[in-house]
Image (spheres, coloured by chain):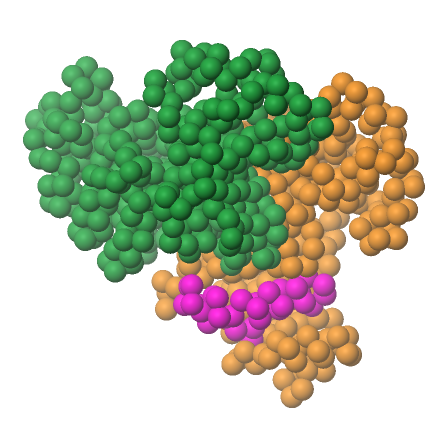
Chain colours: A orange, B green
């Protein structure tokens, strides 16, 4: 199986490390010979039909910041040109996300489908903005479109719903889909500190970003609940349709008061037939949704299995790489293996 | 896709109801034309290569207790003879379980593999006793072996680990794998009642069996942790290897005392490299493992995704049918579709 890595930041490096450490495992368990035939970043592309040396790629990127400097095989080919001209089974699209326009990642994905390549992505933007166009394009070109890593990192909510619960109709999804805000609320609860203090601490620890707006406003959660609504419940909604409230007005006193009645406060994203919202909600202390720290959780309500919940780590490079790896294996097992 | 239903009790009826209600859905979403070409019980078999009428089958069974009375297509062919002679893609094996010998279900499964049929089962016995023989036989005959319904009912632990978390190595599995004991412990906790009182009440409600030994001794949980150990962690263990303690000695006072320190008491099955045990354990009140009523939960510890937990209903005819349906879809999508 030949793949092109589109984007080479923190997640891209995590993917290469995971692939390297799992090379023998993939061969033994699935008979899969996985080759990275191209890696693109803003500087250009490294291309080798026999498979790039991943250690060299990681080293060059670390030392020079540019994959175009890869010895001999480095080129100034753009991402689009690489997708169009390099022969591969799938692209792994992990460029920076833009949750307002989805650009330019959506173009990369459409171009991949049109050029006969499956797409795996961790990119929320295009999924939240252009889902219908992308899935239609995948179907027209008979290609697979997998995006487990876009929601909940290593919490396997999408593949759980699509595969492990195949045959079930999903009526409702709700969950904690943002690790940063869950970390902040958990910390406010256990230490009685106010929002600003905990946010500042989280920024110093690298848990919250310098510009935390997308997380604390609920926008990131909104993008994710839109992705789940469109991909698992056949809806056609966008972020603008989400009733949105963030966590900036939550006080430690409010959480302490909730605790006294046996509840905690969590930022919950929710979609059902008559609901699409993100906001702080009271959750019983002993409810499966009361997960701590930066954990994510999602609860599905279905016709046959009824309630099913899944809990996992929402972020981290290796955790996200885990989700991408499960998508690589899915594509290999469901398509590549049978067409060789 | 043609299937043979081997066993026609509560779960078998649930499967037929689920298949009937999902007929159009399976056609639209997967292009699957699902036919039940034979149904077997102790009385014999009903066989129709064009697909049996499932309403008629359910009615005959309800009214006479014997599928052999199915109009015109009823026969006195035994289960083994039916598996050997009826052309089908897969059998769904749901005869009563024997967790000591696995018989006679293990013979049905081996016979199915040898006759070129995939196997789906909900049957703990053969999996706990004969797993290696069964999986080897499946592999030798290039057939798929799926058993999601054998552990945790509608809680999709096995397919979650195998498919949604594909690529991960699993270091540890622990969980609440028996709904009856979780119901009893939860009820003792919330109402302060003693074990015998709650057990009697659960028996009257049909939640506990007349002979509750397998549940309350931890044996049922032991069978399930053995299945998970062998199928997800490549172990080769049996129930005899499990360090076993049940819940009969737990008092409401012990639970109240645990509560005071922020804990609850749950019957936990656990496997890791140096542990294989079932027994009552202290679990923090706000831990994802503290699930109430008859819910089941399983926590996986893996190399890439780290901790992932899944919560779901451990029993119920339609819930179990959901697990079987996901296995039917898996076999169709991964094999049947490509070989036609």
Please tell me which residue is depicted at 57% across the width and 25% down the height of the picture: B292
**Residue A188 vs residue A105, the one in the foreground:** A188
| In magenta stretch: residue B196 | no
Horizontal relation, residue A297 to residue B227: left or right = right
Q: Is residue B96 above or below residue A23?
A: above
For residue A138, say whether it is visible.
no
Q: Is residue B96 above or below residue A109?
A: above
Horizontal relation, residue A88 to residue A237: left or right = left
Image coordinates of residue A147 in percent, x first then y, are 58, 52
| In magenta stretch: residue A11 | yes
Please tell me which residue is depicted at 67% across the width and 23% down the height of the picture: B257
Horizontal relation, residue A329 to residue B240: left or right = right
Magenta region: A8-37
**Residue B289 vs residue A134, the one in the foreground:** B289
Residue at the extreme front = B249
Image coordinates of residue B161 in percent, x first then y, are 49, 49
For residue B58, say whether it is visible.
yes
Which quadrant, please, contains the C terminus of chain A? bottom left
Image coordinates of residue B177 in percent, x first then y, are 47, 35
Q: What is the quadrant of residue B122 in the picture?
A: top left
Image coordinates of residue A62 in percent, x first then y, are 75, 75
Q: Main secondary structure of the magenta part?
A: helix
Please tell me which residue is depicted at 45% across the width and 53% down the height of the picture: B233
């Amino acid at each position: 199986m030949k793949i092109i890595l589109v984007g080479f930041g923190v997640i891209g490096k995590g993917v290469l490390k995971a692939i390297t450490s799992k090379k023998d495992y993939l061969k033994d368990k699935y008979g899969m010979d996985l080759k990275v035939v191209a890696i693109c970043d803003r500087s250009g592309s490294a291309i080798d039909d026999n498979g790039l040396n991943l250690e060299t790629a990681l080293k060059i990127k670390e030392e020079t910041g540019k994959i175009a400097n890869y010895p001999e095989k480095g080129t100034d080919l753009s991402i689009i040109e690489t997708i169009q001209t390099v022969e591969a089974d799938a692209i792994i699209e992990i460029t920076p996300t833009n949750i307002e326009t989805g650009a330019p990642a959506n173009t990369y994905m459409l171009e991949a489908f049109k050029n006969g390549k499956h797409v795996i992505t961790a990119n929320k933007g295009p999924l939240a903005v252009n889902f219908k166009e992308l899935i239609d394009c995948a179907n027209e070109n008979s290609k697979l479109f997998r995006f487990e890593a876009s929601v909940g990192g290593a919490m396997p909510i999408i593949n759980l719903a699509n595969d492990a619960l195949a045959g079930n109709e999903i009526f409702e999804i709700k969950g904690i889909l943002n690790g940063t805000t869950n970390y902040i609320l958990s910390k406010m609860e256990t230490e009685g500190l106010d929002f600003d203090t905990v946010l500042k601490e989280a920024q110093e620890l690298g848990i919250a970003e310098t510009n935390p707006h997308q997380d604390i406003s609920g926008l990131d959660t909104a993008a994710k609940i839109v992705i789940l609504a469109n991909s698992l419940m056949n809806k056609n909604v966008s972020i603008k349709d989400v009733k949105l409230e963030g966590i900036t007005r939550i006080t430690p006193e409010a959480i302490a008061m909730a605790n006294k009645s046996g509840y905690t406060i969590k930022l919950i994203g929710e979609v059902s037939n008559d609901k699409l919202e993100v906001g702080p909600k009271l959750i019983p202390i002993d409810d499966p949704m009361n997960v701590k720290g930066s954990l994510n959780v999602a609860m599905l309500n279905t016709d046959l299995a009824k309630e099913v919940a899944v809990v996992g780590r929402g972020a981290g490079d290796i955790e996200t790489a885990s989700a991408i790896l499960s998508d690589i294996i899915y594509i290999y097992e469901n398509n590549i293996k049978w067409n060789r």
